Amino acid sequence: MLTILFRTIVIYIILLVVMRLMGKRQIGELEISDLVTTFLLSEIASLPITDTNIPVAFAIIPMIVLLTFEVSSSWFLSRFPILKKFLSPLPATLIFDGKINRREMLHSRISLDELIGELRQNGISDISEVKYAILEQNGKITVIQKAECKPISAEQLNIEVCDNGIDHIVISDGCVNKHGLEILGMTYEELENILNSQKLKKSDIYLMLIDDSKKVKIFKKEKN
Amino acid sequence: MRSFIITAFLFLLMLCIIFFNMQYVRKSADYIIDCVSDSSFEKDAKEAVKDLENFWNDNISKISLSVGYKEIDRMSELIIDLKAYVAVGNLCEINRTRDLIAETASDISRLEKFHLENMF
């Protein structure tokens, strides 16, 4: 048990250092510590399931150690943000005011093809339109266009737009979704009134959505 | 905060279990080594093997909580072998099996110690 405990700690620290040195591109959407924990947990959990020669305790100990590291690291990082720079690389500005920062590109090991591809994915074909392109801590590239290249908003045109909010599911496959009604602040009777006004029964409805402005959308069940 | 406290509690509980289990396994391994190295073994081998077998059968479930099945199976096999050699009186094999049992017991004990050998 003691050997397993120390081995888990050693491997966790080594993996953390390796992933930190690999840079942002290998991380994906997760934090480095999250990624290391996910890697290790999936392997640890599967071993005693498939190999009956391994006692379950050999998987429980590393799992508890990883849980402790994960919870304590996020706890400490939320209280002492300065520690974050040791675990996660700082954001890197790859393009500033339409100019590519070659030093940061080399440092972050991002190729021009990758950068241009990311810009294309953001709907930008001309680098000179970019105010900032920042490689974030999770490995994603945030692209911010120059003000003159940004699409015109309704606010800039002084046009009033109706914000209907989001749709909430009220009836799903004939069943009332109480949570949806609670969010909308509606009662069961109000729902019944809407259904009666449209001469519908709950059982006839496949999906009923109501948005924040109380606009109702109903999709009836198809009759076979 | 609640998850942090629960995790800290689980971790401390695990450390306690590891500590007590480590002591237990090391004591058991020491007992086995003493048992097979003892000079009384030569005087009454049958009785000594019976004691060893009883001790092993009584403690196997607790020891196997933290010791791998490979070591557990090896020790069980060696004790059965020793019992058979004692029954037929094969002195050469008895001594060889006693040494192997002592070595397996020290391996079990080593795994419950902080050793660089265990780490890498």
Image (cartoon, grey):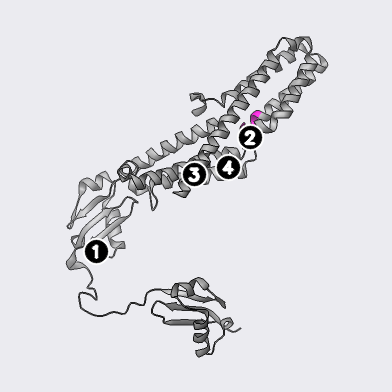
Amino acid carrying mark 3 in the image: Thr
Given residues B118 and A167, the one toward you in this image is A167
How many residues crowd mark 3 within 10 Å: few (<14), some (14–19), many (20+)? many
Q: Nearer the viewer, residue B55 or A58?
A: B55
Question: Residues in magenta?
Answer: B65-71
Q: Nearer the viewer, mark 4 or mark 1?
A: 4
The residue shown at (53%, 90%) is A199
Q: Quadrant of the N terminus of chain A?
A: top right
Can you tell which mark lies on residue B65? 2
Tell me how far mark 1 sits from mark 3, CA to CA.
Answer: 49 Å
- The chain to which mark 1 is attached is A
Q: Mark 4 to mark 1: distance in Å?
A: 48 Å
Mark 4 and mark 1 lie on one chain; the one further toward the N terminus is: 4
Where A120 falls versus B112 (above or below)? below
Element under label 2?
A: loop
Mark 4 sits on what residue? A47
Bin the neighbour count of mark 2 within 10 Å (Cα to Cα): few under 14, some 14-19, many 20 and up: some
Image position of A181 with respect to B23: above or below: below
Residue A129 horizontal side relative to residue B98, left or right? left
Q: Secondary structure at mark 3?
A: helix
Asked if the residue under mark 2 is in contact with the one under mark 4, i.e. CB atoms within 8 Å, the reply is no
Residue mark closest to the camera, 1 vs 3: 3
Alpha-carbon span between mark 3 and mark 2: 22 Å
Give the image location of residue A121, x and y in percent: 31, 62
User: Which element carries disc 1, helix, strand or loop?
Assistant: loop
Residue type highlighted by circle 4: Leu
Mark 3 = which residue?
B7
Q: Earlier in the sequence, mark 3 or mark 2?
A: 3
Q: Could you say which disc has been placed on residue B42 in the image?
A: none
* Residue drawn at the location 49% of the way across and 39% of the way down: A65
Amino acid at circle 1? Ser
